[in-house]
Amino acid sequence: MHKPPKRTISVYDSLRQAIIEQALKPGTKLPEDSIGETFGVSRTIVRNALVRLDAEGLVDIRPNRGASVAQPTIEEANDIFDMRQCLEREVMRRLCGMDTRPIVKALKAHLAEEQNALGKDGTRSIRLAGEFHILLAELTGSPILASYVNEIVSRCSLILARFAQVHSAECGVEEHAEIIAAIAAGDAEGAMGQMHSHLHGVQDRALLNPEDERAENVADILSRYRLKEAG
Amino acid sequence: MHKPPKRTISVYDSLRQAIIEQALKPGTKLPEDSIGETFGVSRTIVRNALVRLDAEGLVDIRPNRGASVAQPTIEEANDIFDMRQCLEREVMRRLCGMDTRPIVKALKAHLAEEQNALGKDGTRSIRLAGEFHILLAELTGSPILASYVNEIVSRCSLILARFAQVHSAECGVEEHAEIIAAIAAGDAEGAMGQMHSHLHGVQDRALLNPEDERAENVADILSRYRLKEAG
DNA sequence: CATACTTGGATTGTATGCAATTTTCTATTT
DNA sequence: AAATAGAAAATTGCATACAATCCAAGTATG
């Protein structure tokens, strides 16, 4: 959103992308030295990028211990999803109060891209699904609402990386189509409802996950394996 | 919320406070050197603090040109106030769905402080008024909602510093009392309405300011004076 | 054998130096 | 006198050196 020096932004973007795409898993340590080497810049640059990511909630910086990819707890995850519901509800409310024709046009163009990438490129598909929500927010014309949604969508990606088994099942393209339809019909209540159940579905798939291996200890995991062998 | 090294935070807090209290006016240049000298730290520390403030929207960093206190436009100001309405409405909605007794108790304690500081300490009075809204958000138990409200309240302080003539008329203590009363009555709609008109009042006092010297050019200002003399 | 202590390596915290860029001031020209 | 060009001063961008802290492995001790 703002414009710090070019190289800092470049490192920031790369790290952010890597975290969102789950290439860097939650908990991964992010040493300034090695990252700097990778990108061919000094620790100074890396540090600035990490500070920004920390402010955004994607990484966790602890004094004298360095940075690592954030590991949101279940409680934080639910909190973030609730906030997302609130923000995206506002997006719907605003969009339905505007001239919906150019909005629907832009959304349909994006949807076409999503459908196009569907079977082919998994990573691209996931990214486009997230960007659909960001596009919605941008179409409200409110920079601050857009930036909040942008931030919270990436935090949700991080949550999915942490808790969901199947990262690709994140967003359903058909559900996006239904949201567009509700907007096109100028049906504010309907659009908000559609969005609500869409997000609720994502949240459920991510967090109502009965076996959360990371929250268990080793004994629990092994005991499950032992039972399997016995059965 | 997060925890970067102690000295960075210290400088960050000081600058933030100074901006919010209007000691540093919008547009003021913030050179790394002189700030570092003032606080007895190096440019490195100052820079980190400035990056954080930039991410928060309180300062504006432009490449090779350094940092200055942000100067939100009227459009940005309205955008931010709209967002604030949305967030604080959510705060009200949540609070009214909870056990209101401990909440009301905490709020009344804060209100007492506000009343106590009313005539005596202007700066303290302003700070407490802002903190009332932050306290409301914290009482929802949602860290992320609280952090968003915290951020947006400080941005609103910056806006008031930029546009309002009388900084002290910011928040009415009686209005805070009415909001508490609505919460105590468990009246969600009423509480949201109270909050809405309260914030709307603040926004109006700040932005419906007919003479905004900074948005006009010199000719306009002078023409007004000429008319006065002629009349 | 387990526990506590010590030491070495790795990583972060901070200051500072140098290069690059911007800004300001001055001198020259029209 | 105004405008412009150019040089000097100030400020940021970045890298790096050194100090402080943390972590792990190994050693001594009960």
Image (cartoon, coloured by chain):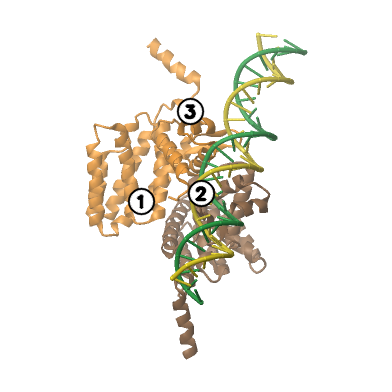
Chain colours: A orange, B brown, C yellow, D green
Q: Is residue D2 left or right of residue A66?
A: left
Q: Residue under label 1, please give it.
A: A89
Residue B20: x and y in percent read 57, 59
CB contact under 8 Å: marks 3 and 1:
no
Q: How many marks?
A: 3
Quarter of image, res A17:
top left
Q: Is any atom of residue B141 visible in this view?
A: no
Quarter of image, res B215:
bottom left
Q: Is residue B74 left or right of residue A190?
A: right
Callout in the foreground (2, 1): 2
> Within 10 Å of the Cα at label 2, are there few (<14), some (14-19), or many (20+) other Cα atoms?
some
For label 2, the SS is: helix
In space, the residues marked 3 and 1 are separated at their CA atoms by 31 Å
In space, the residues marked 3 and 2 are separated at their CA atoms by 26 Å
Residue A37: x and y in percent read 49, 31
For label 1, the SS is: helix
Badge 2 sits on which subunit?
B
Let me know if marks 3 and 1 both belong to one chain. yes
What kind of residue is marked 1? Arg
Tell me the tag on residue A142.
Answer: none
> Within 10 Å of the Cα at label 1, are there few (<14), some (14-19), or many (20+) other Cα atoms?
many
Q: Residue under label 3, please give it.
A: A215
For label 3, the SS is: helix
Q: Nearer the viewer, residue A216 or A39?
A: A39
Q: Residue under label 2, please give it.
A: B147
Q: Is residue A145 above or below residue A164?
A: below
Q: Is residue D22 above or below residue B142?
A: above
What kind of residue is marked 3? Ala
Q: Residue at x 54, y 39 (%)?
A: A44
Q: Is any atom of residue A9 visible in this view?
A: yes
Badge 3 sits on which subunit?
A
Q: Is residue C6 left or right of residue B156?
A: right
